[in-house]
């Protein structure tokens, strides 16, 4: 396939250009190119504009033209900035218990929860983890995701967490999508660790992270700050040490109780994810900080809990990314479009805010500036839906699937033929 191609006409191209990283956005601010086209060169967007002009340029320069026969709306390839799709086993039993009224923490205390997945993931081979992850990545691709973050965190031993990170790397190599690995060895204190939570953190800092850096397995690290997981003292020590070692940082914060967002802000991390329990004080502090809040509506839907206060965060001036949190426990659905549509309606977000949350704001939560908008120079990750009105994408709440997806300028999914 040629490294250069011109594609069009799209009924609409939603560029996401000119929109701010932080604060509320109304739909009138969306740049919509009606009857648009793009030139893709070496994996990047080389030009974008009205189809007539782009077609002329392509003709003059002798570039191949890909004529689109259908009504298609193009948006930037979606970025899922928070997933746990490297795991073995199912927690349908937990789901049934929660549906019947047991809480997430009660189930964990009774031997279900994260620990159950840890035992199954420890027993799985690296190959099996890679294979099941590739299936989940292709499901994410079906909802238009072209970049997915994937966390470790279900082995909780040095060897087991390395196995997870190696499986994540392999899945990233074998998938057309970009996979961004994150270390989460501090998910809970493993039941078979004989020592305190702080000793567990020390053990990982000494034994695990040097190998991660040597093998270049990940540049990001995460921690679950919660009453049943890790406290503020452990989190501060973990985050400040890894900050010094050059890791990019994120925190599972304020899911059931507050505290995590405060540590996130104090340690200057890139993103604070969850925030379902955040109140006025936490919202104000997040808005005043450089931390990007990430809402995980899949966890609210999977647990039957409150949603992250997205509207209030945006109105106070914070940024807001939206991710699936796909995992076997709290967020089994794993469909970013469905989660984002429902969250937007519940929290009264404009469609521009929902789109921003799954494109350039999600990219920023991963520290990526090179994707999430359709502009000259950006990576040519494009998701196109068969419609002439971008509002249909969320109106159909996940049921309108992308018809065509381009990753770095290559057509990787096409259901038109
Ligand atoms: O993001 N909150 C902690 N971690 C995951 C859930 C993991 C699990 O239940 O397996 C989350 O919701
Ligand atoms: Fe999570």
Image: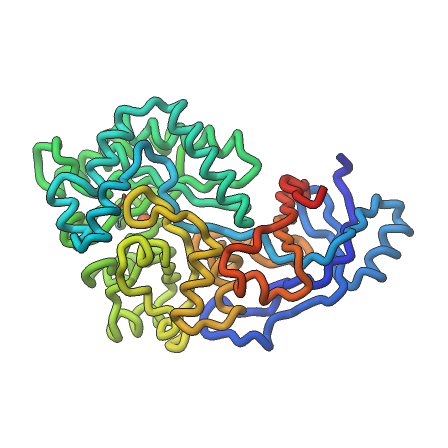
- Identity of the residue drawn at 59% across and 75% down: 29
Q: Is residue 292 above or below residue 325?
A: below
Q: Residue at x 36, y 57 (%)?
A: 296
Q: Quadrant of the N terminus?
A: top right
**Residue 404 shown left or right of residue 203 in the figure:** right
Q: Residue at x 67, y 48 (%)?
A: 44
Q: Is residue 335 left or right of residue 190?
A: right
Instruction: State how the image is colored.
Output: rainbow
Question: Image height check: is 141 above or below 16?
Answer: above
Where residue 401 appears, as percent x and y from the top left, is 57, 51
Q: Is residue 247 visible?
A: no
Residue 344 shows in this picture = yes
Front one among 365 and 242: 365
> Going 23% across and 41% down the picture, which residue do you hit?
93
Instruction: Where is residue 276? Give x, y as percent.
Output: 28, 63
Q: Position of residue 105 (x, y in %)?
A: 16, 51
Report the front residue among 331 and 193: 331
Q: Position of residue 244 (x, y in %)?
A: 31, 46
Q: Is residue 7 left or right of residue 361?
A: right
Residue at the far right in the pictured view = 60
Quarter of the image with the C terminus in it: top right
Outermost residue, left side: 195
Does 25 sit left or right of 320 as displayed? right
Tally the numbered discs: 0
């Amino acid at each position: 396939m040629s490294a250069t191609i011109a594609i069009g006409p799209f009924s609409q191209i939603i560029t996401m250009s000119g929109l701010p990283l932080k604060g509320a956005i109304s739909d009138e601010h969306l740049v919509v190119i009606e009857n648009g086209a793009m030139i893709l060169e070496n994996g990047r967007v080389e030009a974008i504009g009205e189809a007539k002009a782009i077609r002329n340029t392509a003709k003059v320069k002798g570039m191949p033209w890909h004529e689109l026969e259908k009504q298609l709306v193009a948006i930037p390839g979606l970025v899922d900035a928070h997933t746990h799709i490297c795991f073995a086993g199912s927690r349908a039993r937990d789901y049934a218990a929660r549906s019947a009224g047991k809480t997430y923490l009660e189930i964990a205390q009774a031997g279900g929860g994260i620990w159950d997945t840890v035992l199954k993931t420890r027993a799985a081979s690296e190959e099996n983890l890679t294979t099941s992850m590739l299936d989940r990545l292709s499901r994410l691709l079906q909802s238009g995701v072209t970049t997915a973050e994937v966390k470790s965190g279900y082995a909780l031993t040095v060897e087991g967490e390395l196995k997870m990170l190696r499986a994540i790397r392999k899945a990233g190599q074998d998938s057309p999508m970009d996979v961004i690995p994150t270390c989460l060895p501090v998910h809970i204190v493993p039941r078979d660790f004989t020592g305190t939570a702080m000793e567990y953190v020390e053990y990982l800092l000494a034994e695990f992270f040097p190998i991660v850096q040597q093998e270049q397995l990940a540049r990001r690290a995460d921690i679950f700050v919660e009453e049943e997981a890790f406290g503020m003292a452990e989190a501060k020590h973990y985050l400040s040490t890894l900050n010094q070692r050059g890791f990019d940082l994120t925190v599972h914060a304020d899911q059931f109780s507050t505290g995590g967002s405060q540590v996130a802000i104090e340690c200057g991390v890139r993103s604070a994810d969850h925030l379902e329990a955040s109140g006025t004080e936490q919202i104000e502090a997040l808005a005043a900080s450089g931390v990007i809040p990430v809402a995980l509506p899949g966890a609210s839907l999977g647990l039957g809990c409150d949603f992250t206060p997205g509207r209030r965060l945006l109105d106070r001036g914070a940024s807001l990314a939206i991710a699936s949190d796909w995992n076997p426990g709290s967020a089994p659905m794993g469909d970013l479009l469905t989660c984002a549509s429902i969250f937007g309606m519940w929290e009264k977000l404009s469609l521009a805010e929902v789109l921003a949350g799954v494109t350039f704001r999600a990219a920023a939560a991963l520290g990526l500036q090179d994707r999430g908008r359709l502009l000259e120079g950006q990576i040519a990750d494009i998701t196109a839906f068969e419609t002439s009105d971008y509002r249909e994408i969320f109106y159909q709440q996940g049921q309108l699937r992308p018809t065509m997806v381009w990753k770095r300028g290559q057509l990787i999914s096409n259901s038109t033929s």
